[in-house]
Amino acid sequence: DGVVYSQLPRSCRVMLLVNPQSGRGQALQYFYGHIEPMLTEALVSYTLVITEHQNHARDLVREADLSQWDALVILSGDGLLFEVVNGLLEREDWEEAIQTPVGILPGGSGNALAASVHHYTQSSPVWGEELLLSCGFLLVKGLVSRLDLVSVHLSSSRRIFSFLSLAWGFVADVDIESEKYRHVGAMRFLVGTMVRLASLRVYQGRLAFLPVRDTPQTGQGTRDRATPSTPPKSSSCSSQPSGPNSSPNQNSCHSANSIQNTAHNSSNNAITTMTTEPRPANQRGPRDSLLPDLEQPVPEHWTVVKEEGFVLVLAMSQSHLSEDLLAAPGATADDGCVHLFYIRAGISRPALLRLFLAMEKGAHLAIGCPHLVYEKVTAFRLEPRSSEGALTVDGERVDFGPVQAQVHGGIARLISG
Ligand code: ADP
Ligand code: MG
C-alpha cells in the first residue's frame, strides 16, 4: 500500500514503449487488443514506440525531451523497464528525470513488477491477460506513488539501478536457463525450477548485509525521499504530495525472522563515515553513502553471514519474483528496504520444492524451514567464490563477480493503484 503521491494530469501524454519480442512475441497484439481501446476511451494521448533492439529504449530515454511526457510506460517484461529506469539515471538531469512517472503493462515472460503492482492494490491474484487489464486500468486511473531503487555495483565497477531483484544461485540459474522456454510464457519459471531442482548445487561465496535496524538514521537507505530537488511535473493532481516524511515505514522494517547463525565482522578497517569527495562525472545518479569500496572490508556494524555455502541468495525490492511467485509478501514499492533471503547449503530437494510451492501464495516464511533466512536490509555485499553460476539483476544477466548494493528509498515514481 504505497502512499499515493500524485496523479497524472487528466489529458496526459504517455510515451508507450513496446518490445515486440518479449514473452511469446504477442506484445503488439496485446496493445491493439486491450490497451489501445482503454487509452482511447480514457482520452490518454500516447506515442507508440516499438523497440527494435536491446538498449533501444535506454538510449531513447537518455536523450528524450522529458518535458513532452507525463509518463513513460512499457508494454513488455521487466527487462524493458530496467532499460528505461537506467536510461533516466544516466542523464545529466537525472535527479529530475527519475521523477518522471513510469508504468508497466505486462507483455513479457517475466512480469514481476506488474504482478507486484497488482498485489499492492490488495486485489486477488490474476495472471496473463487479466493482469494486463488490471495494469491497464491502473494506468488510466493514473495514481502515482514512490518507488525504491537499488544501486548495484558490479565487479566491472559499472553501476546499475534495480527496481526488482538481485539473484545468485538457484533463482538466477533458473532465470537464465529458462530463457529457452520463453515460448511457454510465464510457465518458463516453473519448468526451469523443476529442471534445476534435478541438478541442485551449492554455490560458494560470502554474504554480508546492513540490517534496517542497524542502519544509521542519517544514512541514505530509507530516507532518500526526503530531498526531492524539484516538484514532480505532473502535479495537476487531486491528491497532493503529503510531505516527504509522511510514510515512515522505517519502523515496520524490522526483521521478521531473526538470523541465528551470523557473526559480526571484527575488521579494524571499518568505514563508518559517509564519503564526501566528488564522484566521477560519468557516475550519475544518487551517491551511495552506505557502501565502502568493493575492495574494502564491510563496515563493522554490518552483519557477516558465517556460512559460505548457499543454494540461493535473493534480494527482493518488490513482492513478486514472477507472476506466480510471491517471494516477499511484506514488500511495498517504497518501503525503503531490500528483502534479503538466503538458503543455506544442506537443504533437501523435497524441502526446497516445498518452499517454492509455498511461495506461490507467499507462505514460504511460515513453513519454519531452518535453511531459509530472511532479513530486511538497506545494503548488502555478495562475493561469489565459485566461478560457475550466474548473477541476475531484475531478471537480466549481469557481470559475474563480487557485487554490492544499497537502497535509495522512493527516488522514482511508479504508476500504481
Ligand atoms: P521478457 O520478459 O520476455 O524477457 P523483457 O522486456 O524482459 O521481456 O525483454 C527481454 C530483453 O529483450 C531485454 O533485455 C530487452 O532489453 C530486450 N529487447 C528490447 N527490445 C527488443 C527488441 N526489439 N528485440 C530484441 N530484444 C529486445
Ligand atoms: Mg526479462
Image (tube, rainbow, N blue to C red):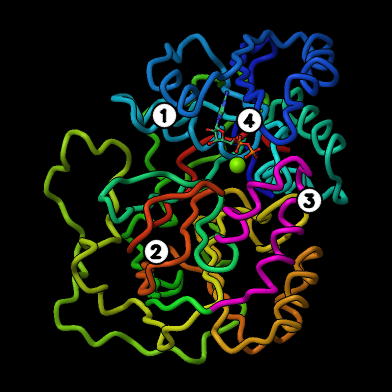
Residue linked to disc 1: 87
Nearer mark to the viewer, of 2 and 1? 1
Which mark is first along the chain, 3 or 2?
3
Q: Residue at x 43, y 87 (%)?
A: 307
In the structure shown, which secondary structural element does the residue marked by tag 2 occupy?
strand
Q: Do the residues labelled 2 and 1 touch (CB within 8 Å)?
A: no
Residue 255 seen by the camera:
no
Residue linked to disc 3: 187
Which mark is first along the chain, 4 or 3?
4
Nearer mark to the viewer, of 3 and 1? 3
CA gap between label 3 and label 4 equals 24 Å
Which mark is first along the chain, 1 or 3?
1
10 Å crowding of disc 2: few (<14), some (14-19), many (20+)? many
Badge number at residue 103:
4
In the structure shown, which secondary structural element does the residue marked by tag 1 occupy?
helix
Image quadrant where residue 96 sits = top left
Nearer mark to the viewer, of 1 and 4? 1
Residue 230 screen position, x and y as percent: 39, 27
Q: Does the magenta stretch include residue 343?
A: no
Callout 2 amino acid: Ala
Q: Tell me where the magenta segment starts and ends, as one range.
A: 173-201
Q: Is the CB atom of the residue marked by disc 2 within 8 angstroms of ligand 2's nearest atom?
A: no
